[in-house]
Image (cartoon, rainbow, N blue to C red):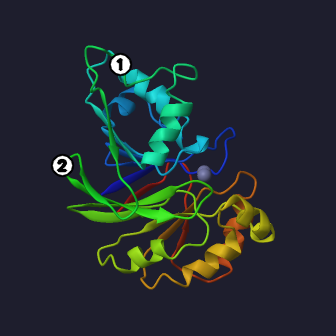
Amino acid sequence: MHLRVLGCGGGSAPGVQLSSYLIDDVLAIDAGALTTGLDYEGQCRVEAIALTHGHLDHVWALPMTLVHRLGASTPMCHLYGSAYTFETVQTHLFNERIWIDLQTARADDPDRVAWHVIEPGEQQTVLGRYEMTAIGLNHGVPCQAYRVRSDDGCLIVCGDTVTTDELWRVANETPDLGGILIECSWPPDWEQLALDSQHYNTSLLLEDLKKLEVDVPVHVMHRKPGFEQQIEEALRASGDERLRFLVDGDEIRV
Ligand SMILES: [Zn+2]
Ligand SMILES: [Zn+2]
């Protein structure tokens, strides 16, 4: 399995892309950088997009990339997400005001975009070759991670979260796990803001990492712009050698 980091920023700035991870060029987790981190041909090769939640930094490029497919000879795009997330984007993005309603955009081909509801604890086969399991997270809105397994690897890609048991339980029970992508938005001094906004800061993440019993790479992402270095230094000081620090453009093979 090959994962490419299109964007792993916890905010937007020149040179900082929003959340989007691309597996084997065809399966994207979140859409925060699908148009700014991937050229048009690359976008047309994406056959499935799984959304962790409906916050704007994870979905804003979804309308942009989906509209590229209309009138083009691209494969159908399969969307995955919770019913809550789909209701969010259908009501607040694809509402004929912010953007076109893609359910009715092509009367001659209404199946150009297929919506597949997947809730925490459920598992579905994606594109005939990925076993994808949704894992519930703790955030301000319903949010989920995805464990994605193919013939040659297994990864967990998280959405936004604060302290959780379920994620680490699933990780501990995944013998072929090749790594976890986990958020850490704020540095040590910002614990109250992290709790208020339902994100990890460094101290909350380090406390939660004690629950992870397996020796797998833990790739830290969603660092707020301007705090990247502070977050990295605080986490490195823990001495936990499983920690890695993602930047846009990184590639991971498992
Ligand atoms: Zn969020
Ligand atoms: Zn976010």
- Identify the residue shown where x is 48% and y is 52%: 52
Q: Which mark is residue 70?
A: 1
The percent position of residue 216, horizontal first and vertical second, equals: 42, 76
In the depicted structure, whether residue 130 falls above or below residue 59: below
In the depicted structure, whether residue 14 falls above or below residue 96: below
In the depicted structure, whether residue 118 falls above or below residue 17: below
**Residue 133 visible, this angle:** yes
Q: How many neighbours does mark 2 have within 10 angstroms: few (below 14), some (14-19), or many (20 or more)?
A: few
Q: Look at label 2 and name its amino acid.
A: Gly
Check disc 1 and report its element: helix, strand or loop: loop
The percent position of residue 98, horizontal first and vertical second, equals: 58, 23
Q: Quadrant of the N terminus?
A: bottom left
Residue 171, image quadrant: bottom left
Relative to 231, is 143 on the left or the right? Answer: left
Relative to 145, is 238 on the left or the right? Answer: right
Q: Which residue is mark 2?
A: 128
- Identify the residue shown where x is 28% and y is 22%: 110
- Identify the residue shown where x is 37% and y is 19%: 104
